[in-house]
Image (spheres, coloured by chain):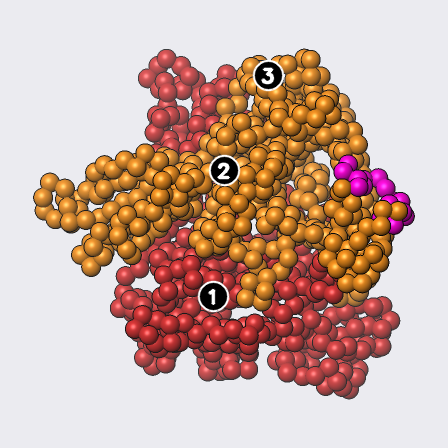
Chain colours: A orange, B red
Amino acid sequence: MKSDELFALLRRRGVLWPTAEIYGGAQGLYDYGPLGARLKRRIEEAWTTWFLGLSNDYYLIDPAEILPEAVVRASGHLENFTDPEVVCDACHSAFRADTVLEKIRPDGVDGLTAAEIAAIVHANRVHCPHCGSSELSVPPPFNLMFGLDYGVTGHERAYLRPETAQSSYLAFARMWDVGRHALPLGIAVVGKAYRNEIAPRQVLFRLRAFTQAELQIFFDPRGLPVPFDAVREERLPVLRVPRREAGEESPEWVTAAELVGKGNLPEFYVYHMVHTFRFFRDVLRYPGDRIRFFEKSDTERAFYNRIQFDIEVHVESLAGYKELGAVHYRGDYDLTRHGQGAGKDFTVTLTGGTRVLPHVLELTFGVDRNVWATADLLIAKDGERTVWRLPPYLAPVAVGVFPLIPKEHGSEAVRIANDLAAHGIPVGYDDTGTIGKRYARMDEAGTPFCVTVDGGTVGTGPEHGTVTLRERDGRTQSRWPVGELAGRIAPALLLPWPARA
Amino acid sequence: MKSDELFALLRRRGVLWPTAEIYGGAQGLYDYGPLGARLKRRIEEAWTTWFLGLSNDYYLIDPAEILPEAVVRASGHLENFTDPEVVCDACHSAFRADTVLEKIRPDGVDGLTAAEIAAIVHANRVHCPHCGSSELSVPPPFNLMFGLDYGVTGHERAYLRPETAQSSYLAFARMWDVGRHALPLGIAVVGKAYRNEIAPRQVLFRLRAFTQAELQIFFDPRGLPVPFDAVREERLPVLRVPRREAGEESPEWVTAAELVGKGNLPEFYVYHMVHTFRFFRDVLRYPGDRIRFFEKSDTERAFYNRIQFDIEVHVESLAGYKELGAVHYRGDYDLTRHGQGAGKDFTVTLTGGTRVLPHVLELTFGVDRNVWATADLLIAKDGERTVWRLPPYLAPVAVGVFPLIPKEHGSEAVRIANDLAAHGIPVGYDDTGTIGKRYARMDEAGTPFCVTVDGGTVGTGPEHGTVTLRERDGRTQSRWPVGELAGRIAPALLLPWPARA
């Protein structure tokens, strides 16, 4: 499906819509409706279960989204978190410089000053993409953070955090005290980050308020021990810099062992690439051949990263590979900067007395983008049917409950629905239209199971106390005792857990 | 416990700490650590399960926290969401006017203009509480919303939402389209709201970023049908205005039927008071005799409310009753205002053709305050023990898993811990110190179950494959087969569901 068509489907079903839609919307902001809110939450829980499942020493925290200025000064965001922009002096539109110049400078404008960009704009007689005027100017780089006048005196400044990772770095010292004084120590945050993007677009792909899931693994710089043998034969789709520079777009499938050996990557890094790949393929159930690890070169990667591979997935509705997550080896950049900023020393003493400043491996994941990706990759036409083939544990509604004839079977159907809900199973009750239409609505919403209550259920014959259980994927129908439904459905809703060794 | 003592305990255990603590903190902001994040999430889920359980037509959505200016202009927040402040011209401190004047005007300063407040300040020769100067001034009222320069042109203004409720009003028209075109329709939001409080204090009770859980029930103004007979004999602790004005602080216990009859309240309103009371008493397990419904008078209640009772709970650490939730009958204020603001008509056509503008009943709940209240009300000393008597389904860690001798029983204990976790049960693994110390740490964290793996478990004798299961509340210990643990523990973690009729 094209992006417009997919968005129309998602809006019609109440998965998501523009924020403040009745006021004409707000650029770069979306609200999740009932199905979207539940899907997003389940994707967050799946991520948390999988990655925190890698160790007993990884923890989820829930920090505030507002940061005092000292934090973003130390982290480098106040100085560096900018996008060069081009502004039209005629119509006052603003554009990202890399977008305006994408034909002239296909490699982007990273590293150029505003004056250098202005020179390129004028030398190439660039016109405003909106009104056509040639009166374009290039102001000083635009900081993407939202600032807040914090407190009442007018002397304090704070910012909405531009990435959740900062909250984990701030928490390291406290978590060290709370915990068992050992490395590795993992601190995860699932929450909002905010960026005043110059040009929000592609629905959930460039938002001004978005949800990240990020795990910061603090480890002894002398090594992060991992059970590498358990993953050494796993093949990963990798597009490294030399192959990219040769013009290739498709990844090569390479074993973990080869990435460490010939590929010269650390074992701990490749081990986490494997578990990340498994998360996308086995938990989110994206087709493996749509995924690639995209290596960033020295000039492309973020200034704090020593190694960076983005996880990209081919998203048909956006006509290309899109970054849905990443694995970042950040070294000691963050603890060093916050040590300087806060005037503290984050060196820790390990058992045996060795003192080290931990390094950080960051696993990062874009929650909103993956909500979209599950729709793009898992919604399929099957003849007349539109089926969202979500894994059962991600489905917003796990079971649809239908009375065949609402007047006759409604009260029993409600009783069954409430009983399933009391077992923690998300239920969708539907008593409108033919059973076929109700199946179709549930298929489109990704619901894996449907239960129909009929004359047999409430009658005195051999079908007394049984219902029809219909499964989305096989379209199979079978008769089940009401009392066995929760036991049949609940195990399919358990979130997958990683094999550690 | 006193507030300082309780906060010290919670900080030591990693339940919560000040945001950006390493930079000296930020007033009115706190981060939740591992135990706090999980407890907060479970309180949110308990609220959602209970109140959305009241109807098949109540839905949870997840909207953006940023609102365009037009929204808060229409809602009245741009004009009215202000606190009068007093500023010291000598030391530049700012204070809430009601706090500075609390001895002179014990009833507060609501309704007074800045000039009137200034006159009182000067007539009474008030001095700065911070530096003692008499050079105090009263600026125009201070709007509590955080404003954002939204977008890049400098011409757009947006705000962090001051209450989650606005997001539900904005969603009403879309949800009507998505849903089955019938009333009542409930729209719930659990999420952040932001207020630039003049004087943040009492840890989680006056924050600048806080989490609300709010359900807006849109209903036919001719009546919201409820199964009132099922609740008519329930007794509620109520402190109404006349009794308050007579100087009483303690509530009277009155049946739901009496509140409707002699008390002149609508059935639908009292029905929701009952379910709210049950949530605090039966789900959160606060002692019923610590709870009261506090009626707000005509002059006290928010301008949009027709009926308002706050749910107050006596919190020992804060030495008094504190508002932890409320039931608001808001009438058609919100849809009328947004209809005017957006130039739309939110009248809906019901089956049969009647057209109505829905009224709103709002159930609101302060998540952070209730995190604190569970600690205040449910942590108790029991001899040497400190026990947090959280209901099992709210406990951050449901089961502690201990190897008696880590070197001998560690691998089996890890296997059991992982198996329980894979069943969706939150596990805390602990192999440090004596078993007694490990029990004590789990008691303090509110963990209801502990499992010890010992020689019997891994041996070949009659105890092979069994573990010791210890329960927090009864301090009972019994021997259980490993394979039956998940089945024993998981049912205790199901969130309670309301009896609808």
Residue position marked by numbered label 3 in the rendering? A255
Instruction: Tell whether position B237 is magenta.
Output: no
Residue A320 or residue A58, whichever sits in front: A320
For marks 2 and 3, give the one nearer the viewer. Answer: 2
In contact (CB < 8 Å): disc 2 and disc 3: no
Where does the image place residue B83, in percent across and percent down from the top left? Answer: 67, 73
**Residue at position x 46%, y 38% in the image:** A378
Q: Residue furthest left?
A: A461
**Residue at position x 76%, y 38% in the image:** A106
**Placement of the N terminus of chain B among the 4 image quadrants:** bottom right
Q: Pointer 3: residues within 10 angstroms few (<14), some, or many (20+)?
A: many
Residue B244 makes an appearance in the image: no
Where does the image place residue B214, in percent across and percent down from the top left? Answer: 49, 61
Residue B384, numbered label: none
Q: Pointer 1: residues within 10 angstroms few (<14), some, or many (20+)?
A: some
Residue B410 makes an appearance in the image: yes
Residue B173, numbered label: 1
Residue position marked by numbered label 2 in the rendering? A377
| Chain of the residue under the numbered disc 3 shown in the image | A
Instruction: Tell whether position A110 is magenta.
Output: yes
